[in-house]
């Protein structure tokens, strides 16, 4: 109804359901740039700074941010900007590992569950319920404490907690498609049921899975940073963002040690969330 | 404005908010308070003392009392002898003593009228019970002896009468009287000593004779001590013998160093234990007192496990000795309040000599030692021999400030000579497990009052702590240990101590870093009259709060 | 409907019990992989004050010298009877440790949940009824809340309100003000998904026929919000609250550590560094029980709140 539509449009002015005529909104562009920068930091850290994240000039310890040291120096005279840049690799790569685990394992479970139904669905469903029942962060903490305090283990732990969310999503998508008319139609045409499912499920599901994956990427960065903050990640001299915040806060007179990595975390995750929202709303 | 621009605004607003609070935080601390002159002590007042942790049980007889617990014990218990920050001994519960028969027999004369907090007298019988507990422990009940007590030659302690105790040793025990001032030798009621070990873990069962008594507590969180009104036997050296001036002391556990510092800095508590050395200058500039007393004891350094890889190779031990740049550590991690080490015992110990050539920083010498021993540089710069990389794990000592930064720096320095150091950070709870696992390098922090008691840790003779894992395999060390524990006069003992220092350092059994300041006290300007003893503990018996 | 509902409720309850059991087993298997010899490290530590007889008792109790599956059977049997074992660090009964810590965490979590709901409702209301300029900003707030790590929020709040403005002191973490700030820290990441769901379902509902009709009848927006929109829109949020319980428990580990509170989060943190398996096992299993119970309640309430939901369908979801 056109009246309804107009009313709705007026009502929801200010929501992202409006597609901008300019194409990609500026904030999304900025977000992509931030993510690109972060990815480059993790792949080619030496391009961005000449300082070493491990060895510093002990004479210039705890210097405030300046032109030579953009983020200041830490308690051993190391350039804090270099430490953040080199720490990106483990903070970001580990988050990608976590998402990959969640995505691959979770989707496989969801697909199997939704496709076969019956007892497989019930069994896998309970397994997924168990993963959901244990609070994600607690589960990650327990897994890391078992495997050993290393960032890669934190990544695995975060990934395991993410499996459930992907599994649920994939299963819902599969069920939705399964019930739709054209799958029945293609089956009647004599096609393999699994084939039909895949050719119809994946193109339709990939959008929501992508949105979820991007969102989980941001969440994983936060979880891994929190684990590192508690000391459950790689030990010094590694410079995970969370570990930088934890070691920095001991030095009350040098607040830049805390706020520089904190700002980087917030900027990164904010950009990721922005991209995720844009993806979701531009369906 | 379009919705898109609003999102950008929120984005920027968020960043600004965080940056704003960062700027706010960076802008200086609380207003500087001028410290007034020490005036007349006033009675009354309460202080809150912030400390890292009190997680484990309160068994009094342990091999060594933790630096944290010692702070609380010192207020609720007394000792027989007092040692001041210059190492001078003076009477306390023992009003006088005699050393007879070449330091093999001692007579202690006790002060009159001393009682435990439950009213029972602290008489000779009580002292005898304590001496036996310190010397022998009660192994059948799981109670260990005091590690640094001269136990190997202890024979007996007996009460000659209600005010006199006779102690005898089988060979000269020059360190006996001094050890009575050690913070592990606290006088407890015989009732407490007789309890089984799990009852002793309960602080409420510990009955002492100190100027404060335990009023209320919540395990692992807070402990409130209140003053004992009939206390009348303080050590004369402190200039006060009556009851304490403060009404209460509350020990509050706050694990985080920066939170402890900030809480006192913002006036919400009076004393914080162990702040970061690098904060000291700016805290002093704000009018706070930072006490950095040095105790008698071992320097900050590593005891080396001679049986573990790779420190079973003496070249590796010596390479580490010469590969560490201690001056860089002092300049970076610590302040001028920290002194260089000349040996493995602190500078204020009379027998400490200058053996710094045994561990002088010389990276080339260290590299040559490793080259000659067959450790060749591998592809990533770390040395390899027989397929094994020259690496070892290192855990910073959570009982000493800034050891994390110190160990990170050491890792960097050793990397330059090709040794890989893998840091593992644990807190107090995990550190006991690290100690039990006997790692190649273990960071020690131990005080003692008399150098003769060092014998109790070097080997495994007489149930010693066997710091270097040599057992009794090193004959020379065995001989030196025994000699120092049973030396008959102070001159010959000093000579033996010299030989011991030379030998231990040359063999690379102990790797000194710098002289240790283990206990730092950040004290609010309103608190006056805090004094430090020879074991670097702050005593609040004479303290008061200026109104 | 009653018998359909009854069957549905029973099936759901059965599922819940299975999940709890499986969660216990999974946790046990994960934890028992913990490296290090619990016996030597925790028990034999001379500082713990345990006698040899005590150590033997503990070894026998847990079957620490038996294979893993035997230990699991022992453990599970005890859990089902409510016996949670003893801490390896302090030798106190785990139920006592958890019981002592629970009030602090419950207070914190309840306050945080309340604050999160308030935030979420305020944001959702504002996002819908505020002038377009503000609505846009408000809609972006949940995303921003989800971008700041909770340890940063906590540190900033402490720095500002404890050390600068002296609103509370870190030496008394259980004071009302300190708890309030800790609760805000915990609430912020929790309010975000709540707000987003409320906004989305308000968006959805506001386009429905009946809303249009109600508006045309001249009902004030606020009344509309309250009467017609909150109830059915609350549906997805009831399931949300269950998920949020999980977030609250997980987030409490960091929040309690930063604010120095003595709750379940701190117990977990100490248990991890002390490799105290029985305590970890108990806390994780109990969290699963809480989560499952809340979820069960949510599932059972859903058909009652919105008659449009088919009980059969809900059972298959």
Image (cartoon, grey):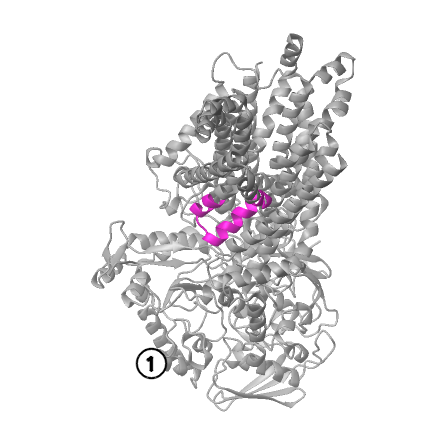
Instruction: Rate crowding at label 1 as few (under 14), some (14 to 19) or many (20 or more) other CA atoms within 10 Å.
Output: few
Tell me what residue is drawn at x 66 percent, y 42 percent.
C12
Magenta stretch: residue C19 in it? no
Q: Main secondary structure of the magenta part?
A: helix
Tell me what residue is drawn at x 70 percent, y 76 percent.
B116
Magenta stretch: residue A142 in it? yes
Locate the C terminus of chain C by quadrant: top right
Q: What segment is highlighted magenta in the picture?
A: A129-157
Q: Nearer the viewer, residue B253 or A73?
A: B253
Give the labeled residue for mark 1: B475
Q: Nearer the viewer, residue B105 or C253?
A: C253
Q: Quadrant of residue C56?
A: bottom right
Read off the chain for label 1. Answer: B
Q: Position of residue B225 (x, y in %)?
A: 69, 63
Q: Position of residue A218 (x, y in %)?
A: 50, 34
**Element carrying mark 1:** helix
Q: Position of residue A161 (x, y in %)?
A: 52, 42
Position of residue C73 relative to residue C206, above or below, is below
Q: Nearer the viewer, residue A194 or B502?
A: A194
Residue A263 seen from this side: no
């Amino acid at each position: 109804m056109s009246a309804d539509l107009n009313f709705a449009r007026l009502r929801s002015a200010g929501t992202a359901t409006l597609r901008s005529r300019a194409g990609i909104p500026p904030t999304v562009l900025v977000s992509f740039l931030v993510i690109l920068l972060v990815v480059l930091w993790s792949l080619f850290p030496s391009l961005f700074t000449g300082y070493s994240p491990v060895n510093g000039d002990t004479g210039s310890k705890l210097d405030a941010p300046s032109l030579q040291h953009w983020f200041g120096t830490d308690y051993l005279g190391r350039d804090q900007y270099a430490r953040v840049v080199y720490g990106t690799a483990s903070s970001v790569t580990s988050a990608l590992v976590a998402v990959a685990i969640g995505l691959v394992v979770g989707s496989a479970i969801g697909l199997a569950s939704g496709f076969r139904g019956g007892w497989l669905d019930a069994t896998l469903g309970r397994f997924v319920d168990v993963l959901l029942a244990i609070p994600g962060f607690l589960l990650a903490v327990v897994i890391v404490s078992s495997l050993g305090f290393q960032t890669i283990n934190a990544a695995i732990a975060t990934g395991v907690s993410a499996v459930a969310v992907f599994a649920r999503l994939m299963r819902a998508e599969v069920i939705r498609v399964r019930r739709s008319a054209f799958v029945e139609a293609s089956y009647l045409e004599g096609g393999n049921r699994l084939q039909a499912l895949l050719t119809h499920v994946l193109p339709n599901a990939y959008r929501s899975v992508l949105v979820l994956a991007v969102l989980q990427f941001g969440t994983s960065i936060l979880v891994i940073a929190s684990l590192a903050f508690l000391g459950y990640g790689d030990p010094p001299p590694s410079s995970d963002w969370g570990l930088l915040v934890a070691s920095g806060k001991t030095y009350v007179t040098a607040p830049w040690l805390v706020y520089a990595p904190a700002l980087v975390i917030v900027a990164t995750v904010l950009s990721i969330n922005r991209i995720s929202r844009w993806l979701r709303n531009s369906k | 404005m379009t919705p898109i621009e609003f999102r950008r605004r929120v984005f920027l607003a968020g960043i600004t908010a965080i940056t704003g609070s960062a700027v706010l935080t960076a802008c200086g601390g609380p207003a500087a308070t001028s410290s007034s002159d020490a005036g007349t002590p006033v009675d009354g007042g309460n202080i809150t003392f912030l400390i890292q942790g009190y997680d484990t049980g309160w068994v009094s007889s342990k091999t060594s009392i933790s630096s944290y617990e010692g702070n609380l014990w010192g207020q609720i218990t007394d000792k027989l002898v007092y040692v001041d920050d210059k190492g001078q001994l003076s009477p306390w519960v023992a009003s006088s003593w005699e050393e007879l028969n070449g330091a093999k027999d001692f007579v202690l004369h006790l002060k009159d009228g001393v009682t435990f907090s439950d009213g029972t007298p602290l008489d000779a019988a009580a002292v005898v019970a304590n001496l036996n507990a310190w010397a022998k422990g009660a192994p059948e009940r799981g109670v260990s002896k005091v590690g640094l007590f001269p136990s190997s030659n202890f024979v007996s302690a007996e009460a000659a009468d209600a005010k006199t105790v006779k102690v005898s040793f089988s060979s000269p025990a020059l360190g006996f009287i001094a050890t009575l001032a050690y913070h592990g030798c606290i006088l407890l009621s015989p009732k407490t000593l007789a309890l089984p070990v799990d009852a002793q873990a309960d602080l409420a069962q510990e009955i002492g004779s100190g100027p404060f008594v335990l009023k209320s507590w919540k395990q692992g969180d807070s402990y409130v001590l209140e003053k004992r009104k009939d206390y009348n036997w303080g050590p004369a050296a402190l200039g006060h013998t009556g009851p304490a001036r403060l009404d209460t002391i509350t020990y509050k556990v706050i694990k985080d160093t920066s939170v402890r510092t900030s809480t006192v800095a913002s006036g919400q508590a009076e004393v914080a234990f162990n702040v970061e050395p690098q904060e000291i200058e700016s805290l002093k500039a704000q009018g706070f007192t930072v006490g950095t007393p040095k105790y008698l004891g071992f320097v900050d350094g590593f005891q080396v496990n001679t049986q573990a890889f790779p420190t079973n190779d003496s070249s590796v031990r010596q390479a580490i000795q010469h590969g560490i740049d201690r001056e860089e550590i002092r300049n970076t991690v610590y302040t001028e309040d920290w002194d260089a080490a000349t040996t493995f015992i602190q500078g204020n110990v009379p027998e400490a000599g200058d053996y710094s050539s045994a561990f002088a920083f010389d990276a080339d010498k260290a590299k040559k030692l490793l080259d000659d021993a067959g450790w060749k540089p591998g592809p990533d710069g770390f040395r390899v021999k027989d397929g094994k990389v020259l690496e070892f794990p290192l855990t910073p000592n959570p009982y000493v400030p800034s050891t994390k930064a110190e160990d990170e720096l050491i890792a960097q320095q050793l990397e330059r000579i090709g040794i890989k150091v893998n840091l593992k950070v644990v807190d107090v709870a995990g550190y006991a497990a690290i100690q039990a696992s006997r790692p190649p390098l273990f960071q020690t922090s131990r005080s003692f009052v008399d150098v003769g008691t060092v014998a109790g840790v070097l080997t495994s003779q007489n149930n010693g702590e066997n710091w270097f894992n040599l057992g009794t395999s090193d004959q020379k060390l065995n001989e030196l240990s025994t000699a120092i524990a049973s030396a008959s006069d102070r001159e010959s003992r000093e000579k033996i101590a010299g030989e011991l220092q030379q030998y231990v350092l040359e063999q690379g059994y102990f790797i000194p870093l710098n002289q240790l300041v283990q206990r730092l006290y950040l004290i609010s300007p309103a608190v006056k009259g805090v004094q430090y003893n020879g074991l670097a503990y702050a005593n609040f018996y004479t303290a008061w709060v200026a109104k | 409907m009653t018998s359909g509902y009854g069957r549905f409720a029973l099936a759901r309850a059965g599922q819940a019990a299975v999940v709890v059991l499986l969660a216990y087993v999974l946790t046990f298997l994960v934890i028992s992989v913990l490296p290090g010899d619990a016996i030597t490290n925790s028990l034999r530590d001379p500082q713990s004050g345990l006698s040899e007889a005590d150590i033997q008792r503990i070894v026998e109790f847990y079957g620490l010298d038996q294979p893993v599956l035997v230990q699991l059977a022992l453990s599970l049997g005890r859990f089902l009877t409510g016996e949670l074992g003893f801490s390896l660090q302090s030798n106190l009964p785990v139920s006592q440790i958890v019981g002592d810590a629970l009030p602090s965490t419950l207070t914190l979590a309840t306050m945080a949940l309340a604050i999160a709901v308030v935030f979420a409702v305020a944001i959702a209301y504002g996002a819908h009824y505020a002038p377009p300029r503000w609505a846009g900003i408000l809609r972006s707030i949940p995303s921003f809340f989800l971008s700041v790590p909770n340890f940063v929020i906590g540190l900033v709040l402490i720095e500002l309100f404890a050390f600068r403005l002296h609103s509370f002191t870190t030496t008394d973490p259980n004071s009302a003000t300190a708890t309030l700030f800790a609760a805000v820290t915990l609430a912020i990441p929790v309010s975000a998904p709540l707000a987003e769901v409320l906004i989305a379902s308000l968006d959805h509902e506001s386009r429905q026929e009946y809303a249009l009709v109600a508006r045309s009848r001249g009902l004030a927006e606020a009344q509309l919000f309250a009467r017609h929109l909150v109830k059915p829109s609350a549906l997805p949020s009831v399931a949300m609250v269950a998920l949020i319980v999980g977030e609250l428990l997980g987030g409490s580990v960091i929040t309690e550590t930063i604010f120095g509170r003595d709750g379940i989060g701190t117990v977990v943190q100490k248990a991890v560094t002390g490799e105290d398996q029985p305590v970890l096992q108990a806390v994780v299993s109990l969290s699963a029980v809480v989560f499952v119970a809340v979820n069960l309640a949510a599932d059972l309430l859903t058909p009652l709140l919105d008659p449009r939901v088919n009980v059969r369908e809900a059972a298959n979801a």
